[in-house]
Amino acid sequence: MRHRKSGRKLGRNSSHRKAMWRNMVTSLVEHGRIRTTEAKAKELRSFAEKTITKAIRVADIVAKDEDARTAEEKTRLVHAIRVAGRMVRGKDQLYRLFHEVAPALKSRPGGYTRIIKAGPRPGDAAPMAYVQLILDN
């Protein structure tokens, strides 16, 4: 019985899944939209939204001039960048997350991603979907 066991295994071991989620979140931040299977898209949503929330919580600090930040704000910002960096690989993608994506989504109370079904994949007929960031308000 799988009572109270959250998350899909997707036929992978835990290290492969963790690497896959990191790669997918990084790609989502980089491109704004990715195509994957529906099952992966539904699981990816939670990882992406948690990472975006971490960036949104310090969006007001990022907006300030570097000289105007207090020591506590600098500490909070560095911590948020390091925590988000565990999921988003690449300095360019981290910069985009904190300076472009988070300010654009700051006014939203959640639901930063959208899943659009894309029909079956040729070859194995796996249900496909697009996951995209909702950057338009």
Image: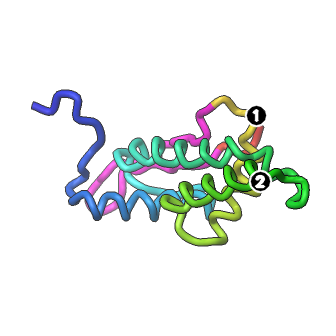
Marking on residue 71: 2
User: x and y percent of residue 67 in the render?
Assistant: 90, 60
Question: In the rendered image, which quarter is residue 78 located in?
Answer: bottom right
* Magenta highlight range: 110-133
Question: What secondary structure predominates along the stretch shown in magenta?
Answer: strand
Of marks 1 and 2, the one in the foreground? 2
User: x and y percent of residue 125 in the render?
Assistant: 29, 53
Q: Quadrant of the C terminus?
A: top right
Q: CA distance from mark 1 to mark 2?
A: 26 Å
Question: In the rendered image, which quarter is residue 104 located in?
Answer: top right
Name the kind of residue labelled 1 in the image.
Ser
The residue lying at 31 percent from left, 58 percent from top is 17
User: x and y percent of residue 68 in the render?
Assistant: 90, 54
The residue lying furthest to the front in this view is: 71
- Number of numbered labels in the structure image: 2
Q: Which residue is mark 1?
A: 107
Q: Camera-side residue: 22 or 117?
A: 22
The residue lying at 70 percent from left, 33 percent from top is 108
Does 99 appear above or below 106? below
**Is residue 73 shown in magenta?**
no
**Is residue 130 shown in magenta?**
yes
Name the kind of residue labelled 2 in the image.
Ala
Q: Quadrant of the N terminus?
A: top left
